[in-house]
Amino acid sequence: MDKERVKELKEELNESFSDAYIRNAGTLIHKLAEQFYKENNLQGKIYFNDDIFSYCLIDILVDLARLKHFHDISRVNYVKFIAYTASWCLKRKPFQIIEGCEEEYIYINERFALTLLLQAGDCYDENVNYYEEDRKDLVKGIGQIYYHLKYRNTNPQTLELFLIGLENGRKMHTVK
């Protein structure tokens, strides 16, 4: 990207976000990626490309800035932030396969997006003791989401709708 374009993007972002917000957003996503990398023992199989991640972060923030401007809102909620993050990670693919890696890692960026969505939806906790039938249904549902991330159109709006649906489903089944 040339210096003039970088300057334009920086100015556009600074109209919508403080430097602290930009830095914190990048740090948050990067920490989530590092956690995913460690939890999935990806050392020697996958590497996280920081250059691709930088472009991914720019795309996320530019989209969110335009969204804020279009809807005349001052803040973007966490659901939108994660939906745009997952979408751009699926497009840019910051996790890269090391040559000779096993087939199971072909969809590593989709697995990362799935992790982001499940974390944001707060819908799966390995420490919770689910009934066996509920656990099977949950695993099946997660498999269907993963399939969607691999083979279907995954724009930020569909991912946001997924997260809103999770939240609404949880509210409907919460006994007060």
Image: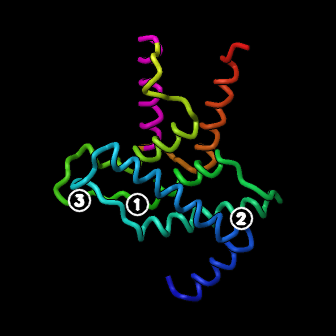
In the depicted structure, whether residue 124 falls above or below residue 72: above
20 or 169, which is in the foreground?
20
Q: Secondary structure at mark 3?
A: loop
The residue labelled by disc 2 is 66
The residue labelled by disc 3 is 98
- Residue kind at label 3, given as amino acid type: Ile
Counting labels gives 3
Residue range (magenta):
131-149
- Give me the residue at 46% from left, 15% from top: 130
The residue labelled by disc 1 is 94
Q: CA distance from mark 3 to mark 1?
A: 12 Å
Q: Is residue 62 left or right of residue 30?
A: right
- Give me the residue at 51% from left, 55% from top: 29
Where residue 176 appears, x then y in whole percent?
73, 14
Q: Secondary structure at mark 2?
A: helix
Which tag, 2 or 3, sits closer to the chain's start?
Answer: 2
151 or 47, which is in the foreground?
47
Q: Is residue 16 left or right of residue 98?
A: right
Q: CA distance from mark 1 to mark 2?
A: 23 Å
